[in-house]
């Protein structure tokens, strides 16, 4: 394997690790006997307690570059991340693990929609095919595993809201990471999201302490495994991969989460879930292959075209440069 191939493979491996870690998130949520906002708040708080000391030790100087514009972007990203966890974790109180993780996995749809609307992304044809397959696979899984009833519908809508929030977060997070090193970025984002979640939890009157030891262990698991390892892997991958690829690869999570739900809680996996999962995995494969294709060379600028458009123009350009070189 060449150095270039290794540099490209490493982010994909880290992203795969993130898929495995985040797939355990729904399991930890079910094990924690606490309210959704309390789980979300403690998840980001405990994760912040891990990454903030590391950021202060390795990236202390980066915090001096936080200007007003960057702080506004951080606040927006933190709010979107808080919204994602608040809505998705709440959805698990109303619908099944398989249904929730499938619907929240529609993130690539919203990345594409938001990215195209805002002009942040230009998706390749292959990536659009991958997104279409991912949507089809998610629809098949959701159709086969959804339960009827107003409560289930509420959970489904909350999961979709979580996907929308994550789609906006992925696009905004990539912009912020261009100005902040990785540890500083996750520290400020996790802390900001935690602050928003604490405000929401306190305002709603949620119980935030006095939990059983098993719940504290579950909260520690979701913070360390799903957040610090899982979401930090995604955030690191955003520095090296396109956000649409990261979003599509998130679709590897529903199948694994459904399997874990079967293992831990005996939640059955219908044949429709398996069929839809095949489409999801195909979408991930296509997205990965598309992202590995080298980008097309940028179009020549008007000045370059003017210089190289004809031999006469080239000679004139050389004469001008020689004249400038002779000036004292």
Image (cartoon, helix red, strand yellow):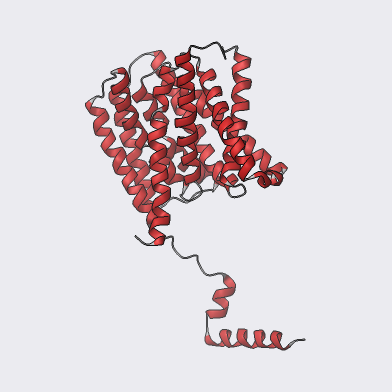
Q: Is residue 243 left or right of residue 323?
A: left
Q: Residue at x 26, y 24 (%)?
A: 269
The quarter of the picture where the N terminus appears is bottom left
Q: Is residue 77 visible?
A: no
Residue 151 screen position, x and y as percent: 41, 14
Q: For this rendering, which residue is in front, 114 or 21?
A: 21
Up the image or down, 229 lies above or below 204; here it is below
Q: Position of residue 56 (x, y in %)?
A: 64, 40
- Say which of 73 and 152 sits in front: 73
> In the drawing, does residue 66 fall left or right of residue 269?
right
Residue 226 in the figure: left or right of residue 198:
left
- What residue lies at 37% left-to-right and 35% top-to-bottom? 20
Quadrant for the C terminus, please. bottom right
Q: Residue furthest left?
A: 271
Q: Can you give x and y, in whole percent of width and height, for residue 42 in the image?
A: 55, 23
Label total for image: 0
């Amino acid at each position: 394997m060449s150095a270039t191939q290794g540099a490209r493979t490493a982010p994909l491996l880290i992203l795969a690790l993130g898929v495995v870690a985040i797939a355990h998130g729904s399991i930890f949520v079910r094990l924690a006997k606490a309210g959704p906002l309390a789980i979300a708040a403690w998840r980001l708080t405990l994760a912040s307690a891990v990454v903030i000391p590391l950021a202060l030790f390795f990236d202390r100087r980066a915090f001096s570059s936080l200007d007003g514009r960057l702080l506004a972007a951080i606040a927006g990203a933190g709010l979107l991340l808080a919204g994602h966890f608040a809505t998705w974790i709440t959805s698990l109180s109303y619908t099944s693990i398989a249904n929730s993780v499938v619907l929240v996995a529609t993130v690539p749809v919203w990345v594409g929609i938001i990215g195209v609307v805002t002009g942040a992304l230009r998706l390749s044809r292959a990536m659009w095919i991958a997104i279409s397959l991912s949507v089809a696979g998610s629809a098949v899984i959701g159709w086969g595993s959804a339960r009827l009833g107003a409560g289930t519908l509420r959970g489904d809508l909350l999961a979709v809201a979580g996907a929308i929030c994550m789609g906006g977060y992925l696009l905004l997070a990539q912009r912020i990471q261009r100005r902040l090193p990785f540890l500083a970025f996750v520290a400020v984002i996790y802390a900001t999201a935690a602050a928003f979640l604490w405000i929401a939890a306190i305002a709603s009157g949620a119980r935030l302490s006095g939990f059983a030891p098993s719940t504290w262990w579950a909260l520690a698991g979701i913070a360390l495994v799903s957040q610090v390892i899982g979401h930090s892997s995604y955030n690191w991958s955003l520095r090296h991969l396109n956000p649409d690829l990261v979003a599509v690869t998130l679709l590897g999570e529903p199948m694994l989460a459904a399997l874990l739900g079967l293992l831990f809680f005996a939640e059955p996996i219908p044949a429709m879930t398996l069929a839809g999962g095949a489409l999801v995995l195909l979408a991930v494969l296509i997205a990965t292959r598309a992202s590995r294709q080298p980008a097309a060379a940028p179009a020549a600028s008007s000045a370059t075209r003017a210089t190289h458009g004809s031999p006469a123009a080239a000679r004139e350009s050389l004469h001008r440069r020689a004249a400038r070189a002779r000036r004292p």
